[in-house]
Image: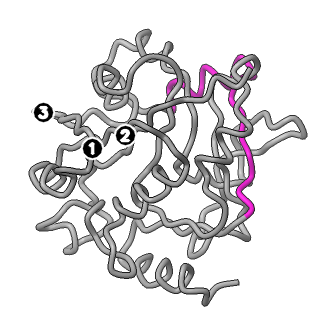
C-alpha cells in the first residue's frame, strides 16, 4: 500500500533574512535563479510529478506571493498576524490540502536530477513510515558547508547526526499536528516523536542540490543547472 499523497505544501512565508538586501522589497521565493523565480522552479517539479493540488503559505510581503500565483491554480494560505513556522503553517493549511499524508517542499533550493517528489512517491510506505525525507549526500550538495542533519541505516530509518543533509522535500502524515499546543512550531517537533518510534525514514537523492538561502547560492544554483557542476 503506497497511499500516494495528492497535495503539496510549498513553504513560502519566511522573511529570508539571510538574503540581506535582496529580500528588502520581495519575498525570498520570488528571487530569480537563471531567470525564473525560486517558487516557479519548485512548481515545475510539482507539475512534473503530477501532484494535483498545491498550496503555498504566505506571510512576509504576502501580496507579492498572491500576485505571482494568481491564475496558476495554486491556493495561498495566509499567516496573519504572526508567522507560524513549518509545523504551524502546515496545520493552518490543512483545510486547503485535504486529508491524509502530504508532500511538503521548501522553495529555497534548486535540484538537478530526478524529480524528488516522484522519488518520494515511489518509496513511500505508510505501513512503516510517518514521514519520508529526501536527504542529500554531502558530495551532492553544491555550496553547502554544514555537517549534515541525519544518519540513515540500511532500512532507511533516520537518526540525528552528521551525515546527509535534509533537502527540504518530504511526505509526512499530518495526524500528529493536532497534538501540538503551540500555534507556531517547527516540524522538528513531529520528527522527534517519529524518531522515538522509529518511523522517520529517508531516501538519498542521487542528483545534485543547491540551497539558495544566501546570496552566493544564486550563482551556484545557476551554474549547477547550467551543467557547470558535475
Q: Which mark is nearer the camera, 2 or 3?
A: 2
The answer to whether mark 2 and mark 1 are in CB contact below 8 A is yes
* Image coords of residue 22 (percent x, y): 22, 73
Other residues around mark 1 within 10 Å, as few (<14) / some (14–19) / many (≥20):
few
* Secondary element type, mark 2: strand
**Residue 14 in the image: x percent, y percent?**
28, 50
- The residue under the point 64% across, 23% down is 3
Task: Note whether 6 is above or below 17 in the view shown.
Answer: above
Mark 2: few, some, or many residues within 10 Å (few <14, many ≥20)? Answer: many
Instruction: Count how many numbered circles sit on residues in the image.
Output: 3
CB-based contact (under 8 Å), mark 2 and mark 3: no
Residue at image position (28%, 70%) is 31
Residue 68 place in picture, x, y as percent = 18, 58
The tag earlier along the polypeptide, 2 or 3, is 2
The residue stretch that appears in magenta = 188-206
Structural crowding at the residue carrying mark 3, measured as other residues with C-alpha within 10 Å and reported as few (<14), some (14–19) or many (≥20): few
The coloring applied to the image is: one colour
Can you name the residue that lies furthest to the bottom here?
A: 228
Name the quadrant of the N terminus: top right
**Percent x, y for residue 87?**
40, 29
Residue matched to label 3? 80
Gap between marks 3 and 1 measured at Cα: 22 Å
Q: What residue did someone put label 2 on?
A: 54
Extreme-top residue of the structure: 179
* SS at circle 3: loop
**Image quarter for residue 108?**
bottom left
In front: 119, or 133? Answer: 119
Q: From the image, tell me which residue sits under label 1.
A: 73
Of badges 3 and 1, the one in the foreground is 1
Q: Can you tell which quarter of the image residue 26 is in?
A: bottom left
Amino acid at each position: 500500500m503506497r497511499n500516494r499523497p495528492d497535495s503539496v505544501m510549498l513553504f513560502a512565508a519566511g522573511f529570508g533574512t539571510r538574503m540581506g538586501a535582496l529580500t528588502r522589497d520581495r519575498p525570498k521565493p520570488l528571487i530569480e535563479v537563471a531567470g525564473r523565480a525560486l517558487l516557479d522552479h519548485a512548481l515545475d517539479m510539482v507539475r512534473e510529478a503530477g501532484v494535483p493540488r498545491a498550496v503555498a503559505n504566505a506571510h512576509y510581503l504576502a501580496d507579492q506571493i498572491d500576485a505571482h500565483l494568481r491564475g496558476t491554480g495554486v491556493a495561498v494560505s495566509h499567516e496573519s498576524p504572526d508567522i507560524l513556522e513549518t509545523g504551524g503553517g502546515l496545520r493552518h493549511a490543512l483545510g486547503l490540502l485535504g486529508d491524509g499524508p502530504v508532500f511538503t517542499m521548501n522553495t529555497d533550493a534548486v535540484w538537478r536530477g530526478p524529480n524528488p517528489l516522484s522519488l518520494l512517491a515511489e518509496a513511500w510506505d505508510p505501513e512503516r513510515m510517518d514521514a519520508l525525507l529526501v536527504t542529500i549526500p554531502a558530495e551532492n550538495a553544491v555550496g553547502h558547508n554544514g555537517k549534515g542533519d541525519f544518519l540513515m541505516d540500511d532500512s532507511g530509518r533516520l537518526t540525528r547526526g552528521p551525515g546527509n543533509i535534509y533537502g527540504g522535500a518530504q511526505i509526512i502524515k499530518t495526524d500528529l499536528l493536532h497534538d501540538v499546543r503551540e500555534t507556531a512550531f517547527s516540524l522538528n517537533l513531529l520528527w522527534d516523536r517519529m524518531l522515538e518510534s522509529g518511523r522517520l525514514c529517508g531516501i538519498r537523492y542521487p542528483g545534485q542540490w543547491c540551497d539558495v538561502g544566501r546570496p552566493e547560492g544564486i550563482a551556484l544554483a545557476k551554474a549547477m543547472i547550467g551543467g557547470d557542476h558535475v
